[in-house]
Amino acid sequence: MAAQFGRRLRKGAVTTAVAAAAVAALSASQAPGATVDDHGRSTAADAQPSPDEATGDGATGNSPYYTDLPPLNTPSPAPTDGTSTTSPVESTAGIPATVLDAYKKAAAELQESKPGCNLPWQLLAAIGQVESGQARGGRVDADGTTTSKILGPQLDGNGFALIKDTDNGAYDGDTAYDSAVGPMQFIPSTWAWAGRDGNGDGVKDPNNIYDAALATGHYLCRYSWDLSDSADLDRAILSYNPSRHYVNTVLSWLEYFRKGTHEIPDGTGTLPGNRSDGGSGSTTSPSSPSTPSAPHTPRPTTPGSPSTTPPSTTPPPSGTPTTPPSTPVTPTQSVDHLEDSGTAKLTAMAGDAFSEKISTKAENAAGKGVAKVRIRYTIVGDTDATFAGGEKVATALTNASGVATAPALQAGETTGSFAVRATLIGRTVTGPIYSATVTQRVADALVRTGDTALTCTPGGQFTDAVQVKATYKDAVADKVAATATLIKSADDATANDKGPYFKDADGKTVRTLTGLTTDADGLLKLPQLYADDITGTYLLRITTAGGATLDVTLTVAAATDTSTDAPASPSPSPSAS
């Protein structure tokens, strides 16, 4: 179950027939007569171990993992509304809300940092299913931390690799031997270099699904592997756990989740039933082997710390009523509704960031804010607006007052209104829908970039082009729509019927140009201007979206004759006789 921390695998030793392997695994484990070895692994799948398995390069310690394969039925995609289902197939295909959010968030981060890896979030889900049954069915808090530690057996050499303690018990509570830790089952020595902070709390915790999912993504994307390539995908999974049966099981779940999955409430997932060590699934941490070489060594208690003495098992006196222990209500379970928390009007110009952010408050039935619950924001509607980072979906954690603030919205080029829906992760709770509007790009000022007088002789062409710069609030106004018209006068904006003109694609005279746009520097350079035979002073008016206007003077005049009469040349002197 633990991720390998050893040497890079030899690429030539790995098969590239990924699809065939997945089918073989599905057939072998579900066919009559399939056998397993002493550790519960299918002998049909592992009959031909890879050289990596034979040499023991993968430092996973043969920790157990869940061997259950997905149903043969193909799951039907369902809306991710957080509602639970009763269908066995849909239950298996459902992924707890916070866990699913962590996988998608990690894959999105890898797409930004390592786009060539092409990591699908469904691969993280497949590994999470095999390693811990999706964090034991989504038993995590709003931060994504498991409600209790998920520990593999002691790697004491008794049926597993021998890995003596490397973390002084910091992660696994064992100062004698290491154990795989957390929903993605990293061993401490691997986590020391592979760990990541996926939820932004400043801590790298293998027991946190956001941290563990991001670490798994980076682990699979090392060595410049491209996971859209079947050979690299095979190598990456094999590097996580060097067992051919493990690879085949993960590939089966990968294909299953790719065909459809949906979100279910946290804590409602179904735990797998079988492990590779012959054990079965349960709601507790994976147990140690039946004959461990040494028990887990608990951390020593310190003064003031909770006692580790187990509770008394002495039965109560006869007649004493007994009350079963109640399950603590999680913050997510205590949320009654979500409401807007004073979000200002959301308006931005195309291409700009929205200056206001969305704020949502989670409250319980008494109207008190609920801290540490996660809220998902989803952009809906015909828009290319995104959250900062280019995502259509973002999550935020409520603070001590129960208020969550979404990342800043970034307007695209599509103008108009769209909506942002707020929902509680982990439960179906009605949330507010926020309206946002993207307006067209505008300019509030136009100036010429040169000051040369624009003149032309009748029937000629202007030697200098007209170029202007548009700004908005003293900043460059790029991609702003503009119109240029040769008008009759400052008081009459009607297009002139004489004087300077432009030419269209067919060479015909036009005196109004539409569809003009400023460039990235806010500059607009007009086409060549020509003059007819009528002299005079004319106006070219340029206007932009937003109301910026500039009048440019054009002069058509005959050329000035600067020549003067020269005195006649003296007659040559008669030659001497």
Image (cartoon, grey):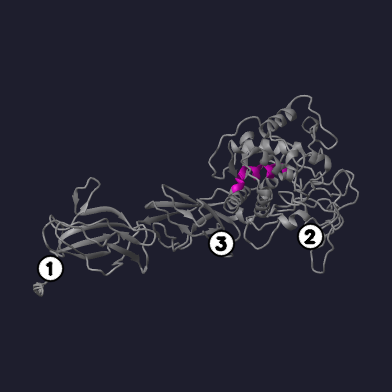
Name the residue carrying label 2.
170
Tell me where the magenta segment starts and ends, as one range.
116-130
Q: Residue at x 47, y 53 (%)?
A: 386
Q: Quote the CA–CA distance across marks 1 and 2.
A: 96 Å
Name the residue carrying label 3.
402
In primary-sequence order, the first of circles 1 and 3 is: 3
Asked whether 44 falls inside the magenta stretch, the response is: no
Q: Locate residue 535, reporting x and y percent.
A: 11, 62
Looking at the rendered image, the disc whose residue lies closer to the viewer, 1 or 3, is 1
Left or right of residue 382: residue 198: right
In primary-sequence order, the first of circles 3 and 2 is: 2
Element at label 2: loop
In primary-sequence order, the first of circles 1 and 2 is: 2
The N terminus: image quadrant? top right
Number of dots carrying numbers: 3
Q: Locate residue 381, reporting x and y percent.
A: 42, 47
For residue 93, above or below residue 539: above
Local crowd size for mark 2, using a 10 Å CA cut-off: few (<14), some (14–19), many (≥20): few
Q: Residue at x 17, y 59 (%)?
A: 487
